[in-house]
Image (spheres, rainbow, N blue to C red):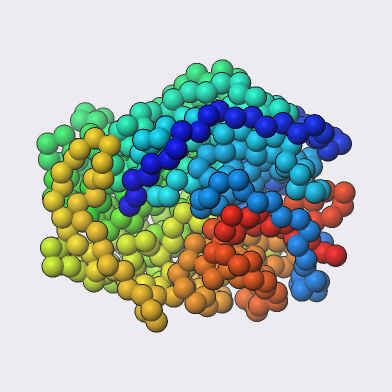
Amino acid sequence: MTRTSARILPAIVFVAALAPAGAFAQVSYDRIVKAEGEPANWLTYAGTYKSQRYTQLDQINRQNVAQLKPLWVYQIRAAGVLETSPIVVDGVMYMTEPPSTVTALDVRTGRPLWSWSPKIPNDVIVIGSPPVNRGVAVLDNMVYAGSIAGHLAALDAKSGAVRWDVVVDDNKLGYYLTLAPLAIDGKIIVGVSGAEAGIRGFVDAYDAKTGKRVWRRHTIPAPGEPGGDTWGGKDSWKTGGGSTWLTGSYDPDLKTLYWATGNPGPDWNGDNRPGDNLYTCSLLALNPDDGTIKWHFQFTPHDTHDWDAVQNVILFDAQVNGRGRKLVAQANRNGFYYVLDRTNGEFITGTAYVKQTWADGLDAKGRPRVKPGLEPTVEGTLVYPSISGASNWYSPSYSPKTNLFYQVAREWGTIFFKGEAVYKPGFGFTAGGGRTMNGDEAWAAVRALDATTGKLKWEFKLLSPGFSSLLSTAGGLVFGGTDEGNFFALDAETGKPLWDTQLGANIRGIPVSFAVDGKQYIAIGAGFVLFVYGLP
């Protein structure tokens, strides 16, 4: 948990004199729907609406990956944690820099084309994460980005000029944005961070052209609304948390948004909020027209271990018991891997993918059979997985070629402590904390799970439980990184290490792949630098 102050940054736009040939093309909604048909571009946060973080490019493959070389690097202008997932459109890369800057680069050379930094007050409130930004959305001729000050802005894709700028919610109460927005037909969808400040979470939709809010779906229902009876205590729903701080997925055929929600507030003391606390730690299937909930699935009812469920959800189709199903899968922070029918939320399967000690498995409907006596206490209670989770914000990947779900799984526990729950607007509302295991008792692995069953196919062990996102490719590779600075490629079928390089800083960036002039590139952020690799 952090409360961050930043110096005042004026709204700045820097525009380069020249742009690459063919730059700044229109990105229609239809192009994004059909993004799998143009793998040279990377048009959404996770590549396509399915969030598979998979590229059909195969120029870089098992046979030649060992020849990868850095082709250019871009140094960010301010110190901070670089967690960006760049978007690439027709030779232009749009990336974010901490805390909320947007930059356009020529992908052939890394030369900046323009850069825009919003106004960030010197008393900005960021509680629950570093002041980061994970990316942008593009639609038609505009680029969309959120800020830690709680704003959403639309920028001209060619110049970086601001077309509109709206307040999503009051940062003084703890609301801020770290996610990449999601662009659908005429709308920009965003969620918010801030559960650790006792916010009431929501998902918003804004008119892409004007910035006018079209709808808001609160993740914490008020009394009398469906789910409101799951919040006991006096007015506990008003500070119920339920952040929506990672980008959702979308099925344009089913016309359904899939957005995952965070932990209830306060994090580690549930005494004042008896009940399941819907819709925290859940997956919401939303109607994009009005934000109504089509169905929901709650992974961790009445969470008291900070096991939010905002991890990316991946959409894929597969055979289950001889029947074709439309599925959605998530490797949850609580230690279980879940597969649901994305048409109706039906629980298909769930299995532990790390050591977990808090539940005797899941029942036939996917509800955990919680072991008694493992709530946080004043003295401390050891529970697996850790306070930071079996997974976290970093991206998994899915390969339709292997039908494997790739996830960095973290093996560690935490001694959870319970504290007093006192709400004060704009301050931390966590009511406890934890002491996480370290040393030999804390490690991680890239794990390849059968996507429909969760069965482990292979693992590649990592020294420490870092924050590595993954990218799988049609060339038979899985790319990832480590806290120690190693950027690596594994065989997607076996997990065999095929290549690695040392980048000199911890890797928090999210890998993407794209092509220009017939050449495939891999981009990754590490430290204060974006590295772009390709074949010689």
**Residue occupying image coordinates x 61% and y 21%:** 163
For residue 536, side relative to residue 206 (left or right): right
In this view, the residue farthest toward the front is 7
81 or 155, which is in the foreground? 81
Q: Is residue 390 left or right of residue 223?
A: right
Q: Which of the 4 quarters of the picture holds residue 296? A: top left
Q: Nearer the viewer, residue 299 or 323?
A: 299
In the rendered image, which quarter is residue 414 located in?
bottom left
Tell me: residue 142, above or below residue 60: above
Q: Using residue 35 as the reference point, say whether residue 304 is left or right of it.
A: left
Image quadrant where one finds the C terminus: bottom right
User: Where is residue 39 drawn, in percent x and y?
Assistant: 76, 49
The residue positioned farthest toward the bottom in the image shown: 440
Q: Does residue 244 appear left or right of residue 304 in this picture?
A: right
Measured as percent of width and height from the top left, residue 149 is found at: 43, 33
Residue in the image at 69% along x and 51% along y = 74
What's the residue at 33%, 66% (across, down)? 386
Residue 343: image x %, image y %? 49, 44
Q: Quadrant of residue 521?
A: bottom right
